[in-house]
């Protein structure tokens, strides 16, 4: 196996797919052919990747002929139906959806944390974690290795692009209706009236508001997004008994998910030691100088690869606990970048070890 | 003492003062004269309260002549200098600033929780808690009485009006510059460029962003706002050893502070029992039906008196912990309303017990 592997990007026209094409263009090229796949609606469209115009083909069994690695950036149900088809056709699938993440025969991989798991390919599928978990877990993992993680209490500040392009459109449509009206928010109902009935993918107006809800309703009042943070953190870190409580909240931010983290460890921690651990950690940038206005924020983290971490403090009432704030680009590390990193680990298997 | 007491509102022209005049107009009238006081800049201005036009007078020692109760809705340093002057002149002061909250000779009162503390008037001053603590504590206190609170992990979503009218102006100025531009947030720096240098009272743009910072820098990297949540919660609940970790974050919301709460108790809790406790609790409204899109949100809580609480869940990994979300109007219960309620407790002392 010394030829460059052929790659398929399924969902190339979507929010994640669009960022994927940017990433494939800017990272070291390790691919032979790059084939772009989407729904029949998009077939024939031409998109730019690696500086070339490539025609989109419709998703079909034939579309995977000759493909070595297939990235899936499509809704859950499309992945559920088609990822096994691609695997059957001989491709190694890296899936961005929620369809396979908790499947015991599918590894959940974050290359900075558990790259060795890419070898567990019982089903020929490797899953990518959800965007909120990803932003947080790359910062938590090195601290876990140092201090032994016992518990996470998480509150998220999730950008509207987590709900795809439709979320971004909804926020901006709403902002044009409320911007500049200083009286808004001063009496009940005004923001709802100003925004009107077109809420896009959200259960309430998101402009001038925060919505403590993301995903679907599960047992005990939990949202699917909150359970993902718990279950995926446990699987990625290999800590099946990790205590996790998460509250997921949508905020009027276009791109960049943030998480307020309270992490309790098995041994005493100190803030400067934790900062030192983070300074050396892969995929993390420490931005922690509040006196000079430096803390992680969506407007700065957007378009960058690492998770930004700052506001690091040792809890005043528990010498084993750290509080900090993390922001990551939900479309890069939270989706396309992590998928690309996993795919590159697989591509390396195609190259003779001596190179 | 059977005459109606005379009231002074110091800072009547500010964000809190303006809401105070609305509240004094709509609640049961228990006051004789209402005198409006502000800086010399505002002297001579006429403001409406109880349907009457009242002329604003400049703050001075003489301004407190004949006043029984003086509300202070002014910056910390003005309260620090002038509340003792008003007390010396014979008025009972109810102060909204941070100047006296942690003074051991000044009670910190939330009428739903510790109304008896209004009698501890060694200095003639009663303090009002800060807005973020207030929204959360009225929901936490009845749960504490039922289950015995041990620990709070808090993450806030604070509205820009917490920084006064200047905060509201800054947000809307910025929103008019970014609204509708869907490309914003897709590359680094764009929101900063679009917003420009005029950040108002905040250390970064707040439109399309969240800023994990409120207040000033204290030891260990904590912000003053985070320490207030810890210290004021302990004092109000009378729990000097309560474990509290708070992360305070500013969000692009005009009015309404929200808090994600993880509360650990001394005994086992159950979600339905906790809901029952909250249904009967004063100053609280339970809004907890996510299947029907009902959860606490700023756009709904604004202009209302109670703290809205919802998203109540028992932690999956700790039978003694509850997770929930709270939203309160930072200018009503978070400031003016709580002050008015305290002042009314004092006014009742002026009325013969038989009435
Ligand atoms: N947005 C995020 O922050 C984020 C983060 C992590 C993971 N994810 C996951 O990544 C996946 C894609 O999300 P997104 O935000 O990019 O969604 P999106 O913007 O809605 O894009 C969906 C993509 O799927 C394609 N597709 C839809 N139906 C199809 C069909 N029947 N056959 C073939 N292709 C079909 C679409 O092609 P057409 O254009 O032809 O319809 C489009 O390329 C989802 O599973 C999502 O949960 C998203
Ligand atoms: N905003 C909130 O959510 C909130 C919540 C809880 C507590 N608080 C506290 O309540 C207080 C008022 O806050 P705010 O948001 O209403 O502030 P604001 O909008 O800036 O209003 C300040 C008020 O203080 C008056 N003032 C300023 N300097 C003065 C001076 N030298 N002499 C006399 N009066 C003076 C102003 O009068 P002029 O108009 O004449 O300048 C104005 O009435 C602060 O201590 C704040 O921390 C605010």
Image: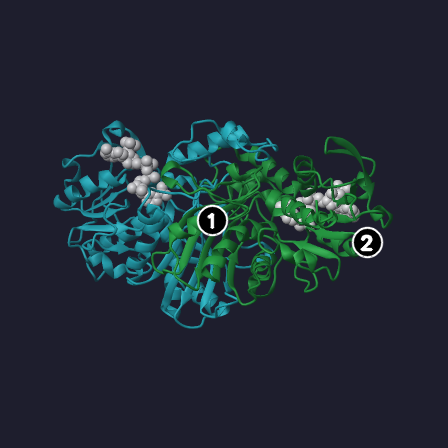
Chain colours: A green, B cyan
**What chain does badge 2 belong to?**
A
Point 48% across, 31% down: residue: B174
According to the image, label 2 marks what residue? Answer: A90
Ligand 1 contact, mark 2 (Cβ < 8 Å) = no
Point 52% across, 57% down: residue: A246
Q: Above or below — where is A29 with respect to B176?
A: below
Sequence-wise first label, 2 or 1: 2
Q: What element carries label 1?
A: helix
**What chain does badge 1 belong to?**
A
- Residue A278's label in the rendered image is 1
Quarter that holds the C terminus of chain B: bottom left
Residue at the bottom extreme?
B267
Q: Where is residue B10 in the image (x, y as percent from the top left)?
A: 25, 39
Along the line of sight, which residue is nearer the eye, B220 or B255? B220
Q: Quadrant of residue B261?
A: bottom left
Point 76% across, 34% down: residue: A47
Along the line of sight, which residue is nearer the eye, A73 or A212? A73
Q: Is residue B38 left or right of residue A86?
A: left
- How crowded pointer 1 is (Cα within 10 Å; few <14, some 14-19, many 20+) is rated as many
- How crowded pointer 2 is (Cα within 10 Å; few <14, some 14-19, many 20+) is rated as some
Residue at the front extreme?
A354
Q: Position of residue A203 (x, y in %)?
A: 60, 49
Q: How many labels does the image show?
A: 2
Q: Where is residue B211 in the image (x, y as percent from the top left)?
A: 45, 41
Answer whether residue A134 is visible to the viewer in this image: yes
Q: In this view, does A61 lie to the left or right of B324?
A: right
Q: Where is residue B106 in the image (x, y as percent from the top left)?
A: 21, 53
């Amino acid at each position: 196996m010394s030829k460059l592997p052929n790659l398929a990007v399924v969902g190339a026209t979507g929010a994640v797919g669009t960022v994927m094409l940017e990433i494939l263009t800017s990272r070291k090229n390790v691919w032979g052919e790059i084939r772009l796949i989407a729904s029949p609606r998009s077939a024939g469209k031409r998109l730019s990747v690696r500086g070339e115009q490539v025609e989109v083909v419709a998703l079909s069994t034939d579309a995977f002929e000759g493909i070595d690695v297939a990235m899936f950036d499509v809704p859950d149900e499309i992945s559920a139906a088609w990822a096994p088809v691609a695997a059957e056709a001989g491709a190694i699938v890296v899936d961005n959806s929620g369809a396979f993440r908790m499947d015991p025969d599918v590894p959940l991989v974050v290359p900075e944390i558990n790259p060795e798991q890419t070898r567990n390919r019982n089903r020929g599928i490797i899953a990518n974690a959800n965007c909120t978990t990803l932003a947080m877990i790359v910062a938590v993992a090195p601290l876990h290795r140092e201090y032994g993680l016992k518990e996470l209490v998480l509150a998220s500040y999730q950008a509207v692009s987590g709900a795809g392009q439709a979320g971004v459109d909804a926020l901006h449509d709403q902002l044009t209706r409320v911007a500049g009206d200083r009286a808004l928010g001063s009496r009940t109902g005004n923001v709802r009236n100003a925004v009107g009935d077109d809420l896009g993918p959200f259960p309430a107006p998101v402009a001038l508001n925060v919505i403590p809800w993301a995903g679907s309703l599960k047992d005990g009042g939990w949202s699917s997004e909150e359970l993902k943070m718990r279950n995926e953190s446990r699987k990625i870190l290999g800590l099946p008994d990790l205590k996790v409580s998460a509250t997921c909240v949508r905020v009027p931010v276009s791109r960049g998910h943030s998480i307020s983290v309270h992490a309790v460890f098995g041994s005493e921690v100190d803030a400067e030691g934790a900062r030192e651990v983070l300074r050396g950690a892969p995929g993390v940038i420490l931005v922690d100088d509040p006196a000079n206005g430096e803390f992680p924020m969506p407007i700065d983290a957007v378009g960058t690869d690492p998770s930004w971490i700052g506001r690091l403090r040792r809890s005043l009432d528990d010498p084993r606990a750290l509080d900090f704030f993390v922001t990551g680009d939900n479309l890069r590390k939270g989706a396309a970048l992590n998928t690309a990193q996993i795919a590159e680990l697989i591509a390396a298997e195609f190259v003779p070890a001596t190179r």
